Amino acid sequence: MKITEHNVETGEIIEREMTTDEVKAMQSEKATLEAHLAELAAKETARQSALDKLAALGLTPEEIAALS
């Protein structure tokens, strides 16, 4: 995987391979992001399930909104 470094003072652009540490850091950050996104999706699924159950009990959208 390559990294592009742009020195804004000199205008020099260098393209180089990522170091092992940079690859590990990127993979770690990617795993953290994926876990966070999965957590958010699970919370949204649980929220929507709760809203659906309230609607099934006969609550109006206004009543459900008042509970949120």
Image (cartoon, helix red, strand yellow):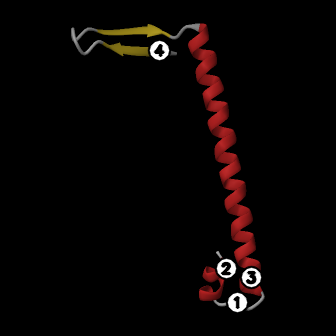
- Identify the residue position indicated by label 3 in the image: 54
Which residue is labeled 4 in the image?
2
Residue 42, position as x, y percentages in the image: 72, 55
Which of the two labelled residues, at mark 1 and mark 4, occupies the earlier sequence position? 4
Determine which quarter of the picture holds residue 8. top left
Instruction: Indicate which label's residue lies in the foreground, 1 or 4.
Output: 1
Label 2 residue SS: helix
Q: Which is in the foreground here, disc 1 or disc 2?
A: 2
Q: Are marks 1 and 2 in contact (CB under 8 Å)?
A: yes
Residue in front for this viewpoint, 17 or 26: 26
Q: Residue 44, how many percent across, how many down?
A: 67, 61
- In this rendering, the count of numbered labels is 4
- Tell me if residue 10 comes above or below residue 38 in the rendering: above
Residue at 63% across, 24% down: 27
- Which type of secondary structure does the marked residue at label 4 adopt? strand
Which residue type carries mark 1? Leu
Residue count near mark 3 (Cα–Cα under 10 Å), binned few <14, some 14–19, many ≥20:
some
Pick whichever of labels 3 and 1 is earlier in the sequence: 3
Amino acid type at mark 4:
Lys
Looking at the rendered image, the disc whose residue lies closer to the viewer, 2 or 4, is 2
Dot 1 corresponds to which residue? 59
Disc 2 marks which amino acid?
Leu
Q: Is residue 15 left or right of residue 40?
A: left
Residue at the spot 67% in from the left edge and 32% down from the top edge:
31
CA gap between label 3 and label 4 equals 51 Å
Q: Secondary structure at mark 1?
A: loop
Q: Is residue 41 above or below residue 17?
A: below
The residue drawn where x is 66% and y is 52% is 40
**Cα–Cα span, label 1 and label 4:** 55 Å
Q: Is residue 6 above or below residue 52?
A: above
Q: Earlier in the sequence, mark 1 or mark 2?
A: 1
The residue identified by callout 2 is 67
